[in-house]
Image (cartoon, rainbow, N blue to C red):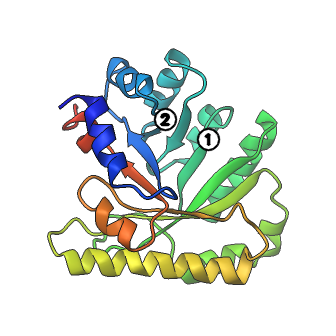
């Protein structure tokens, strides 16, 4: 199967309200261009250095999504061009993104990352931590970030019921934040959940954005 055929197969399963981020981490530029030439514009990377060189090397109408754990000292390198930062898991990081976005003269869209998996290794906020951020006076002073929704990763397991339960949990978090903090903001509309192995379940549970790598590009290169 070609990359174009893989994208077509995935898109055949996506409802109109669900967008596809092609996770291109570790993949060479020529494979990204195959997807680009087939109309794909949103690509996801999880290493700042790799994201920067791909941004410089590839067409400028690509929407770059940062999907990994982002360190505060690296934000400045991607602030001038990143389209969406998926993994905001601390107020410290959010404040740094705001500061670097201001220097770059832009507003950066961000998703709050929640810890929904039973695995200890995944990053993410609890609902209480997110509410603490959103209700703080300090948060209200931020002018160059826009919280556009939520992101989470389910446990890596064959137990479909557990995965479904974790995605349903993230949908509940989204709805709670929407009603309590963002009811007047149409831009708070993204639930980023679902990857190659579980995106069909994620869609059933309310995902509006799936992050798919190996099903498009084949297995990862290291």
The image quarter containing residue 215 is top left
Closest to the camera, between mark 1 and mark 2, is 1
Depth check, front residue: 12 or 25: 12
| Place of residue 198 in the rendered image (x, y in percent of width and height, measured from the top left) | 27, 62
The residue lying at 30 percent from left, 77 percent from top is 164
Q: Write down the residue under mark 1.
A: 83
Q: Can the viewer see residue 118?
A: no
Q: Secondary structure at mark 2?
A: helix
Q: Is residue 159 above or below residue 25?
A: below
Q: Residues within 10 Å of mark 1 (few under 14, many from 20)?
A: some
Q: Which label belongs to residue 24?
A: none
143 vs 130, left or right, is: right
The residue lying at 26 percent from left, 38 percent from top is 6
Q: Is residue 26 above or below residue 108?
A: above
For marks 1 and 2, give the CA distance: 14 Å
| Place of residue 150 in the rendered image (x, y in percent of width and height, measured from the top left) | 54, 66
Depth check, front residue: 169 or 68: 169
Q: Which label belongs to residue 48?
A: 2
168 vs 178, left or right, is: left
Q: Can the viewer see residue 66?
A: yes
The residue lying at 30 percent from left, 68 percent from top is 201
């Amino acid at each position: 199967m070609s990359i174009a055929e893989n994208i077509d197969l995935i898109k055949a399963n996506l409802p109109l309200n669900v967008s596809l981020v092609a996770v291109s981490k570790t993949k060479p530029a020529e494979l990204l261009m195959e997807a680009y030439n087939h109309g794909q514009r949103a690509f996801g990377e999880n290493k700042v250095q790799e994201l920067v060189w791909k941004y410089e090397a590839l067409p400028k109408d690509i929407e770059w999504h940062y999907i990994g754990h982002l360190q505060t000292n690296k934000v400045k390198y991607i602030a001038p061009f990143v389209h969406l930062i998926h993994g905001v898991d601390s107020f410290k990081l959010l404040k740094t993104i705001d500061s670097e976005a201001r220097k770059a003269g832009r507003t950066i869209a961000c998703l709050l990352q929640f810890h929904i998996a039973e695995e200890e290794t995944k990053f993410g906020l609890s609902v209480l931590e997110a509410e603490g951020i959103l209700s703080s006076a300090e948060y209200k002073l931020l002018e160059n970030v826009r919280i556009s929704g939520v992101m989470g990763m389910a446990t890596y397991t064959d137990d479909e019921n557990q995965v479904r339960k974790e995605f349903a949990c993230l949908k509940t978090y989204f709805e709670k934040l929407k009603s309590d903090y963002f009811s007047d903001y149409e831009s708070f509309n993204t639930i980023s959940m679902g990857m190659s192995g579980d995106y069909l379940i994620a869609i059933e549970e309310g995902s509006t954005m799936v992050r798919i790598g190996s099903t498009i590009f084949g297995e990862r290169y290291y």
